[in-house]
Amino acid sequence: MSRARDSDDTSDVTLSVDGEWYVARDEETGIASQGETRAEALANLAEALELHEQPVPEGEDVDDPSSAPWL
């Protein structure tokens, strides 16, 4: 279960370049995102982390992750 981050929370973020894309990765969670600029990659990572921390509403079906085509 994910824990909500406090505004004072800091974690290590790795920024790298892969071709024409900047890749931002949160080392604590392993969540990564990308963008055409550093700022865009970091903003996308922030959004991904926020979505990751949202709980699934009770009664909502969650697909079995093993059914995802990319796994």
Image (cartoon, helix red, strand yellow):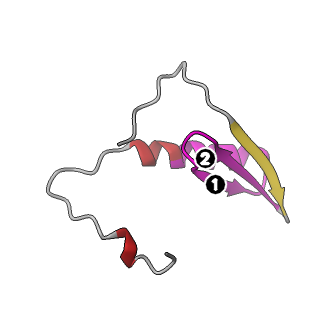
Label 1 to label 2: alpha-carbon separation: 5 Å
* Residue at 73%, 43% in the rendered image: 14
Q: Can you identify the residue that label 2 sits on? A: 45
**Between residues 16 and 29, which one lies in front from this camera angle?**
29
Q: Is 29 covered by the magenta stretch?
A: yes
Q: Can you identify the residue that label 1 sits on? A: 33
Q: Few, some or many C-alpha atoms within 10 Å of disc 2 (few <14, some 14-19, many ≥20)?
A: many
Total labels drawn:
2
Q: What stretch is highlighted in magenta?
A: 21-48
Q: Which residue is farthest left?
A: 59
* Residue at 30%, 45% in the rendered image: 55
Q: In this view, does 51 lie to the left or right of 16?
A: left
| Location of residue 61 (image quadrant) | bottom left
* Residue at 31%, 70% in the rendered image: 64
Disc 2 residue type (three-letter): Leu
Pointer 1 with pointer 2, Cβ within 8 A: yes
